[in-house]
Image (cartoon, grey):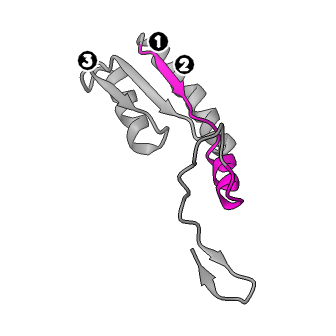
Amino acid sequence: MIILSLGAGVQSSAVLLMSIRGMLPKIDHAIFADTGWEPPDVYEHLEWLEAQAKTAEIPVHRVSNGSVRDGAIAQIGGSKIGGKRWGGMPFHTLNADGKRGI
């Protein structure tokens, strides 16, 4: 079974399209791990990719574990989401005293 991790960027889009056109082996499933915080153009492109994949009977699955933005904001405040700790991202910041930090 061939499963594509579809980020909807240049490389994974090309792999999917090449599979659809028979230039690569047929993909059985493509999975888009939705961060919930992608630019609108990404979702628009993903919809186009899903339509292309449908013509080749390649299912595209959108999966999510919630919004990465909401998780990051909750982590800054020390909150938990659903009672679970959220792994914070290393954001570069500018502290109140003007010093840079992470």
Q: CA distance from mark 2 to mark 3?
A: 21 Å
The span picked out in magenta is 58-79
Q: Secondary structure at mark 1?
A: helix
- Quarter holding the C terminus is bottom right
Q: In the picture provided, is 36 more to the left or to the right than 22? A: right
Q: Secondary structure at mark 2?
A: helix
Q: Find disc 3 in the rendering and name its residue.
A: 1
> What residue type is disc 3 on?
Met
Q: Are marks 1 and 3 in contact (CB under 8 Å)?
A: no
Residue 66: name its quadrant. Answer: top right
Q: CA distance from mark 1 to mark 3?
A: 19 Å
Q: In the picture provided, is 52 more to the left or to the right than 11? A: right
Q: Find disc 2 in the rendering and name its residue.
A: 51
Where is residue 11 drawn, in percent x and y? 38, 43
In the image, 14 versus 91, the foreground residue is 91
In the image, 39 versus 101, the foreground residue is 101
Where is residue 88 drawn, in percent x and y? 56, 57
Q: Find disc 1 in the rendering and name its residue.
A: 55
Mark 1 vs mark 3: in front? 3
Where is residue 91 drawn, in percent x and y? 58, 66
In the image, 50 versus 38, the foreground residue is 38
Q: Are marks 2 and 1 in contact (CB under 8 Å)?
A: yes
> What residue type is disc 1 on?
Thr
Instruction: In the rendered view, tell whether residue 96 sits above or below residue 43.
Output: below
